[in-house]
Image (tube, rainbow, N blue to C red):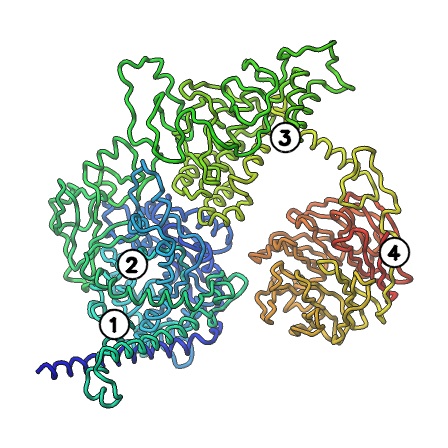
C-alpha cells in the first residue's frame, strides 16, 4: 500500500510539474516572440479616425520618477484634441500636487485637469457616505464621471508608457487590423525597474520623520510596514531587486501564458483600457463607483467585463463577437522603483496575496507549486521515486540523486529566467527617443545593468522567499494597509476596533469613523451586507482603526501628533489626514505659583509663521545629539567670521575681529565712539575728498578679507571706527550658523530666543550647529536692522526660509522641510513657479538636490552667498556690502577694459598704472594662407577644443587642418556630389556634419579620425542649409529648403526623432543655431526669426521683419544673446528670450550674398563679420568699430570664425578660393 501511494504521489508530482513547465514555456515563447522587435506605429492616429480617449491617472504621493511617468501621458503620438488627461488625488495636502501643476504648466495645450477627492461635491454627499471606502475608486470617481468620449484608459501614476502605446491600445480594443476583432478590455504587461532615484518621500520618509518626541500616525503603507525593520543597507534597499525579479520572470511568464490561452481573466491595474458605455451598461450606470466597497477593483472590473455578455445596445447589429481580453504585446507598462526595503517587498506581496485568496482562490492556493524551488522539489521527487522514471533514466532512489536532480532543475529554470530577464530589459520593443527616461531604456544604455552575481542573488532571494511570504499571507491574518488606510479583507464586512483595550470584530455598516469610533448615526442601522441583486464581487474592504477615543482626546489636548481625523464622524467619515504645526517638547511645563509674572513675560515671542510656540523661561531639552544644552559653546566654526564689531553680550564671541570696546548702545557703525583712542592731532573728516569714516571702514573690511585681522583691529582702534555693530555681528553669525529664527528676529525685529521652537538643522557635516552664546534666559527684543531703500522684505524672508528648507532636504528631514514649505514659504506669496520648483526638490537625492537647485549645501558657500544677497538689501551705513573694496576695484578695471578699444585678453589689468592696450596686441596680421580649395570657400569652423579647423567649399571638398602644426592638412572629405555650404563639429570633436546643395541635397556625418562617412541622410529634395549638434552629442538638428523636412531632429542611428511644422508658413530655414545650454533653438526663415524651446519643441517667440532677408545667426556662450545678419547691411545683437535689440553694428556690407558673422575674442567681447567688399569688420560687442581689414581679393568674405581658445587667432573664407589665418 505504501509503495502504491508513493508511486501515485510521484506521478502526481510529475504531471503537475510538467503542466507548470508547459504553461511557463508558453509564456516564455510568447514573450520572446513579441518582445524581440519594436512595435509599429498605429496606422489610425489621424484626427478623422481616432476616437476620444480619456486617460485617468490616480496619484498618491511622490513615487520614484513621478514626473517622468506622468509626462509620458502628454507625449503620446495620438491626436491632441482627441486625448483628455485626468489626474486624481484625494487631498490638496498630497505632495504630488505641485508636480501635477507643473505638468499642466509645461503642457498648456494639453486637455488636462486635476481632480481632488475632498473637493468633489457628489462624493461628499450624505455626510461622505455616497461611496464605499476604496480610496482609489473615491479618488477616480469624478474623473470617470466627467470623462470625455467613451474610451477610458486607467494608468497608475508610477507607470511610464512609450509614446505610441495609446494608438496601439485603441487599435486592439476596437479590433482594427486584419484578422482581429474588438475586445472588451486591453492591458499591458507590467515591468518593474529598480533604480537609484530617490524613493518617494511620502511613502518612506516624510510621515515617518526621525522625531523622537513627535508621535507619527503614518498614512503610508511603506512607513507603517517598515518602521521597525532592520537598517542594514541590503535589507533596507534591495527589496526593489526582488520585485523587479518577480515581475520580469515568474509573473511575466504566467501572466502572458494565461492571457494567451484566455482560460480566465488575469490582469493587473497598471494600464487598462475599456469602454465606459460597456462598464456602465453592466453596472447600472454606476461605472467604477460600483466597486467602491471592494479592493482589487482592477481585477474585478476585468472579471465583470469578461463574464458578462456584451449588451445588444452596444453591438449595434454587428455579428462580430468581442474578445474577452487582449494583451497589447510588445508594449510594457514600466514601473520605476527605488530604495524599497526587503520588508517593504514582503509587505507588498503579502497585501496582494491576501486580496487574491478571495478573488482567485484556486490560483492562489496552488501558487507555491508553480515556483521554481517548489516545482523542482516535486519533479525531483517524481523522478527519483516513480519506478518508470528510475528505470527509464537510470536514476537511483537516493538523497544524492534527489539533490542533483533538484539542482539541475533549478539551474535550468534560472537560465531560462535569465534569458527572459535580458530580453524584457533590453527595451528592444519600446519606442525610445530623447524623452525616454533612463529607467525605461535598455540595461546598460540608461537603466542600470545587473551583474550576473547580483542577478543570481536577487533570483535566489526571491525564489527562497516565495513560500514563506505565501504562507504568512494566507495564514497570518486578514488585514492590509493600502494607500494610507488599513482594511480587513474578507468575504463579509468586518471592522476592527479597540474598545477598552479589547479587540472586537463585528459585522456593521461599511463606513466607519476614521479613528475607529463607530458613528452614532450608524449604530442603529441594519448591517450593510452584499446586495443579492448584483453579481458577487469580492473581497470587501473596511477601514480598520488603530486609535481609541482616549487617544483621540489626548491628541486634541496636546496637538503633538502629526495626523488627525475629524472628531465628528457624522460629517467627515473619510477625511484625509491634516498636518498641524508640531513642537519638539511633548508636554508643556507649568509655571509654579512661586514664579513671578515678570518671569512669564520672558516667554519667547511666537512668530507669525507658526513654527514656534510660546515657551517658558527654561524647558526640557530632547536627548538628541543635535540639541545643545543652554549656554553650550561650539567647538568649531562653520565658516570664517567676516564681522569685526565687538560684542555687547548679544553677538557670538568666537572667531571674530573686534575693533575697540563697543558700548552696545549705538547701532550705526563708527558713529562717534572713539573707544579710548589717542590721536596726536585732529584729523579732517575728509580724505582726498572722500568721507574718512567710509574709507576707514572699507579698509577695515578689506584687511579682514585679506586675512590681516590684527591690522584690521589696529586700524579700528586707532581710527575709532567699527566695521559693524553688535546686532549686525549677531545677525551675520546667525546666518552663517544656520540659526534661522534668531536671524529673522535680528533682521526684521522680534525676540531673540532658543531655537527649540523652530526647526533645528545640522551644518551638513554631521555636527550640530552651535548657537550664539548669549544668555537665553534673558530674552531681548530688537527693532530690526535698517534696510536699504526699496528693499523687499518678503523676498529677504523668502531667501532665509528657502535656505532653511534646502538644508532640511539635504539632511533628509523631509517632514520638517514640508512644514517649512507649507507654513513659512507659501504664505509669503512669492512666484508660484519657485514654490513648485522647491516642492519638486523633495524627490531628489542629496546630490540631485544640489544639481537641481544650483546650490552647494550647508557646508559649502551657500550661507555666505545668502548673507551676501541679504546684505544688498540692508542699509550700507549699517552693514557694508561684502568685499566692498574688491568690488570697487573691479568696477575701475571694468571701466578701463570697456573703454579700451583693443582689449583682447582675460588677464586682469594691473592696478599700478592706468590700462590701455596697443593695436599691436590685436590680431590684424594675416599669418597663413590656405590654398587647397579650387573654388569659393563658403564656410569654416574651429573644433570646440581649438585643435582643428574645417573648411567647406563650392568645389565639393572639406579640408581639416591641424592648428598646432602650422595649419597643415589632416584630412580631406571628398565624397560630396555638390558644393558644401555648411559644416558643424560634434561637442566631442570626433564627428562632423557636412551639408550640401543641389543636386546632392544631403547631410553626411563623418568620423574625423579616419575620414569615413558614418551616416548618409538623403531624405531631402532641396539643399540642406545648416546643422546644429545637441549638447549630448547624440542628436542633431538639420534645416533644409525642402518644405516637407524643413526642420528636423535626428540621432546618430539614422532615426528622425522629430519634425517641426508650421501651418502659417513653409519651413525653409536659411540658418539655425542651438544654444550651448541646449535650451533655445533659433531658426531663420526668409524674413522671420523663430525661437523654439528645444526640450519641449514648443514655439516660444516669432518676430517678422519687413523688406529684409535673414542670412545667419550665432548664439553667445552664455546662451542669452543672438547675433543676426540680414541683408541691407544689417547686423544686430538681440536678446533671445524677448527679441529686444541690444546693439546695432554699423558699417556692415551685405546685400545679396550669404555672409556668416560670429562672436569672438576674449570673453566674446567682439563681433566679427565678412563683407561683400572683400573686407573683414570687427566691432566691440558694445558697438564701436575696431578694425576694417582688407581680407580677400575680389568677391565676398563668406564666413569668419574666431578661435575658441586663443583670442589672438581668427580665420576667414572668401570667394577667392582661399582661407586666411589672422593673428598678432
Disc number lying in front (2 or 4)? 2
- Measure the C-alpha gap from mark 2 to mark 4: 76 Å
Residue picked out by circle 4 = 1175
Q: CA distance from mark 3 to mark 1?
A: 72 Å
SS assignment at label 3: loop
Residue at 43% over, 26% down: 632
Q: Is residue 747 left or right of residue 1145?
A: left
Q: Which residue is mark 3?
A: 882
Residue that appears at 30% across and 58% down: 348
The spot of residue 475 in percent (x, y) is 18, 60
Which one is in front, 771 or 324?
771
**Which quadrant would the N terminus be assigned to in this image?**
bottom left
Q: Which residue is mark 2?
A: 346
**Residue identified by numbered label 1:** 374
Where is residue 389 shown, x and y percent of the image? 23, 87
Q: Is residue 599 left or right of residue 787?
A: left
Residue 539 locus on image (x, y percent): 20, 60
Q: CA distance from mark 1 to mark 4?
A: 85 Å
Q: Earlier in the sequence, mark 2 or mark 4?
A: 2
For the question of whether residue 152 can be seen, the reply is no
SS at badge 1: helix
Would you say 1148 lies left or right of 983 here? right
Query: In the rendered view, would you say 810 is above or below 399?
Result: above
Amino acid at each position: 500500500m505504501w509503495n502504491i501511494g508513493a508511486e501515485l504521489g510521484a506521478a502526481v508530482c510529475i504531471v503537475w510539474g510538467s503542466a507548470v513547465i508547459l504553461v511557463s514555456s508558453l509564456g516564455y515563447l510568447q514573450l520572446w516572440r513579441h518582445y524581440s522587435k519594436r512595435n509599429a506605429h498605429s496606422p489610425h492616429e489621424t484626427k478623422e479616425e481616432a476616437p476620444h480617449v480619456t486617460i485617468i491617472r490616480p496619484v498618491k504621493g511622490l513615487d520614484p520618477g513621478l514626473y517622468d511617468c506622468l509626462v509620458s501621458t502628454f507625449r503620446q503620438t495620438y491626436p491632441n484634441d482627441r486625448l483628455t488627461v485626468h489626474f486624481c488625488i484625494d487631498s490638496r495636502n498630497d505632495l504630488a500636487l505641485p508636480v501635477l501643476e507643473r505638468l499642466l504648466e509645461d503642457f498648456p495645450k494639453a486637455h488636462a485637469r486635476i481632480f481632488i477627492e475632498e473637493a468633489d461635491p457628489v462624493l461628499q454627499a450624505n455626510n461622505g457616505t455616497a461611496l464605499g471606502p476604496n480610496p482609489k475608486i473615491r479618488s477616480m470617481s469624478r474623473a470617470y464621471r466627467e470623462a470625455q468620449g467613451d474610451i477610458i484608459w486607467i494608468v497608475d501614476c508610477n507607470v511610464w508608457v512609450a509614446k505610441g502605446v495609446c494608438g496601439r491600445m485603441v487599435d486592439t480594443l476596437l479590433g482594427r487590423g486584419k484578422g482581429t476583432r474588438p475586445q472588451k478590455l486591453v492591458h499591458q504587461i507590467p515591468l518593474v525597474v529598480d533604480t537609484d532615484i530617490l524613493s518617494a518621500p511620502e511613502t518612506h520618509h516624510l510621515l515617518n520623520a526621525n522625531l523622537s518626541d513627535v508621535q507619527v500616525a503614518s498614512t503610508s503603507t511603506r512607513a507603517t510596514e517598515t518602521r521597525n525593520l532592520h537598517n542594514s543597507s541590503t535589507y533596507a534597499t534591495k527589496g526593489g531587486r526582488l520585485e523587479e525579479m518577480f515581475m520580469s520572470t515568474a509573473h511575466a511568464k504566467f501572466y502572458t501564458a494565461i492571457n494567451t490561452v484566455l482560460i480566465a481573466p488575469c490582469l493587473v491595474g497598471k494600464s487598462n483600457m475599456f469602454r465606459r458605455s460597456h462598464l456602465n451598461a453592466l453596472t447600472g450606470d454606476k461605472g467604477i463607483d460600483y466597486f467602491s466597497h471592494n479592493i482589487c477593483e482592477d481585477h474585478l472590473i476585468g472579471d465583470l467585463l469578461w463574464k458578462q455578455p456584451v449588451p445588444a445596445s452596444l453591438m449595434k447589429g454587428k455579428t462580430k463577437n468581442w474578445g474577452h481580453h487582449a494583451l497589447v504585446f510588445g508594449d510594457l507598462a514600466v514601473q520605476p522603483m527605488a530604495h524599497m526595503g526587503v520588508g517593504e517587498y514582503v509587505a507588498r506581496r503579502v497585501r496582494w496575496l491576501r486580496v487574491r485568496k478571495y478573488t482567485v482562490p484556486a490560483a492562489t492556493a496552488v501558487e507555491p507549486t508553480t515556483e521554481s524551488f517548489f516545482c523542482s522539489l516535486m519533479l525531483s521527487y517524481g523522478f527519483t521515486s516513480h519506478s518508470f522514471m528510475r528505470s527509464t533514466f537510470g536514476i537511483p532512489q537516493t538523497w544524492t540523486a534527489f539533490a542533483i536532480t533538484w539542482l539541475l532543475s533549478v539551474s535550468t529554470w534560472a537560465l531560462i529566467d535569465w534569458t527572459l530577464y535580458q530580453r524584457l530589459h533590453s527595451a528592444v520593443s519600446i519606442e525610445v527617443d530623447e524623452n525616454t527616461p533612463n529607467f525605461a531604456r535598455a540595461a546598460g544604455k540608461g537603466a542600470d545593468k545587473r551583474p550576473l552575481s547580483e542577478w543570481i542573488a536577487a533570483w535566489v532571494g526571491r525564489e527562497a522567499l516565495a513560500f514563506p511570504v505565501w504562507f504568512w499571507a494566507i495564514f497570518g491574518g486578514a488585514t492590509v494597509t493600502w494607500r494610507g488606510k488599513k482594511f480587513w479583507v474578507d468575504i463579509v464586512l468586518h471592522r476592527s476596533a479597540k474598545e477598552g483595550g479589547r479587540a472586537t470584530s463585528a459585522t456593521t455598516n461599511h463606513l466607519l469613523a476614521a479613528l475607529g469610533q463607530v458613528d452614532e448615526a450608524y449604530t442603529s442601522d441594519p448591517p450593510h451586507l452584499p446586495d443579492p441583486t448584483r453579481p458577487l464581487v469580492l473581497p470587501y474592504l473596511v477601514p480598520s482603526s488603530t486609535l481609541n477615543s482616549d487617544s483621540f482626546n489626548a491628541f486634541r489636548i496636546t496637538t503633538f501628533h502629526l495626523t488627525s481625523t475629524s472628531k465628528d464622524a457624522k460629517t467627515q467619515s473619510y477625511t484625509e489626514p491634516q498636518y498641524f504645526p508640531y513642537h519638539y517638547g511633548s508636554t508643556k511645563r507649568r509655571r509654579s505659583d512661586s514664579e513671578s509674572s515678570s518671569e512669564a513675560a520672558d516667554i519667547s515671542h511666537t512668530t507669525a509663521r507658526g513654527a514656534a510656540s510660546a515657551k517658558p523661561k527654561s524647558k526640557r531639552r530632547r536627548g538628541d545629539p543635535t540639541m545643545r544644552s543652554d549656554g553650550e559653546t561650539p567647538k568649531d566654526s562653520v565658516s570664517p567670521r567676516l564681522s569685526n564689531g565687538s560684542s555687547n553680550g548679544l553677538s557670538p564671541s568666537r572667531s571674530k575681529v573686534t575693533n575697540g570696546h563697543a558700548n552696545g548702545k549705538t547701532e550705526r557703525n563708527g558713529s562717534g565712539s572713539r573707544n579710548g583712542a589717542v590721536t596726536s592731532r585732529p584729523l579732517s573728516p575728509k580724505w582726498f575728498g572722500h568721507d574718512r569714516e567710509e574709507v576707514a571702514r572699507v579698509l577695515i573690511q578689506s584687511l579682514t578679507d585679506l586675512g590681516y585681522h590684527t591690522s584690521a583691529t589696529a586700524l579700528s582702534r586707532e581710527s575709532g571706527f567699527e566695521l559693524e555693530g553688535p546686532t549686525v555681528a549677531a545677525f551675520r553669525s546667525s546666518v552663517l550658523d544656520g540659526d534661522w529664527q534668531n536671524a529673522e528676529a535680528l533682521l526684521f525685529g522680534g525676540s531673540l530666543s532658543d531655537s527649540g521652537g523652530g526647526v533645528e538643522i545640522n551644518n551638513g557635516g554631521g555636527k550640530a550647529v552651535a548657537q550664539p552664546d548669549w544668555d537665553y534666559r534673558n530674552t531681548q527684543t530688537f527693532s530690526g536692522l535698517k534696510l536699504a531703500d526699496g528693499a523687499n522684505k518678503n523676498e529677504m524672508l523668502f531667501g532665509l526660509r528657502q535656505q532653511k528648507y534646502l538644508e532640511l532636504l539635504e539632511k533628509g528631514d523631509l517632514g520638517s522641510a514640508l512644514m517649512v514649505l507649507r507654513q513659512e514659504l507659501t504664505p509669503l506669496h512669492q512666484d508660484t513657479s519657485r514654490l513648485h520648483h522647491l516642492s519638486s526638490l523633495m524627490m531628489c537625492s542629496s546630490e540631485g538636490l544640489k544639481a537641481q537647485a544650483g546650490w552647494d549645501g550647508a557646508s559649502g558657500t551657500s550661507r555666505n552667498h545668502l548673507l551676501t544677497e541679504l546684505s544688498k538689501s540692508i542699509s550700507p551705513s549699517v552693514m557694508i556690502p561684502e568685499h566692498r573694496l574688491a568690488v570697487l576695484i573691479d568696477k575701475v578695471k571694468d571701466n578701463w577694459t570697456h573703454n579700451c578699444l583693443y582689449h583682447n585678453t582675460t588677464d586682469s589689468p594691473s592696478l599700478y598704472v592706468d590700462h590701455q592696450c596697443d593695436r599691436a596686441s590685436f590680431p590684424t596680421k594675416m599669418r597663413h594662407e590656405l590654398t587647397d580649395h579650387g573654388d569659393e570657400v563658403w564656410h569654416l569652423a574651429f573644433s570646440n577644443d581649438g585643435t582643428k579647423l574645417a573648411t567647406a567649399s563650392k568645389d565639393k571638398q572639406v579640408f581639416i587642418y591641424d592648428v598646432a602644426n602650422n595649419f597643415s592638412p589632416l584630412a580631406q572629405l571628398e565624397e560630396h556630389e555638390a558644393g558644401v555650404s555648411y559644416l558643424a563639429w560634434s561637442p566631442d570633436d570626433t564627428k562632423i556634419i557636412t551639408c550640401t546643395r543641389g543636386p546632392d541635397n544631403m547631410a553626411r556625418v563623418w568620423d574625423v579620425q579616419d575620414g569615413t562617412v558614418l551616416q548618409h541622410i538623403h531624405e531631402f529634395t532641396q539643399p540642406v542649409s545648416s546643422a546644429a549638434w545637441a549638447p549630448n552629442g547624440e542628436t542633431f538638428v538639420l534645416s533644409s529648403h525642402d518644405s516637407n523636412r524643413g526642420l528636423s531632429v535626428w540621432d546618430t542611428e539614422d532615426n528622425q526623432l522629430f519634425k517641426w511644422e508650421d501651418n502659417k508658413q513653409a519651413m525653409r530655414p536659411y540658418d539655425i543655431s542651438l544654444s550651448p545650454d541646449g535650451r533655445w533653438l533659433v531658426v531663420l526663415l526668409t524674413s522671420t526669426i523663430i525661437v523654439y524651446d528645444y526640450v519641449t519643441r514648443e514655439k516660444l517667440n516669432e518676430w517678422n521683419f519687413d523688406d529684409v532677408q535673414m542670412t545667419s545667426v550665432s548664439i553667445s556662450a552664455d546662451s542669452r544673446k543672438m547675433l543676426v545678419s540680414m541683408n541691407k547691411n544689417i547686423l544686430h545683437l538681440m536678446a533671445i528670450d524677448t527679441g529686444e535689440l541690444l546693439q546695432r553694428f554699423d558699417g556692415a556690407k551685405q546685400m545679396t550674398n550669404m555672409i556668416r558673422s560670429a562672436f569672438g575674442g576674449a570673453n566674446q567681447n567682439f563681433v566679427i563679420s565678412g563683407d561683400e567688399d572683400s573686407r573683414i569688420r570687427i566691432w566691440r560687442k558694445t558697438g564701436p568699430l575696431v578694425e576694417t581689414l582688407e581680407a580677400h581679393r575680389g568677391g565676398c568674405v563668406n564666413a569668419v570664425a574666431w578661435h575658441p581658445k586663443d583670442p589672438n587667432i581668427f580665420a576667414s573664407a572668401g570667394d577667392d578660393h582661399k582661407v586666411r589665418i589672422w593673428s598678432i
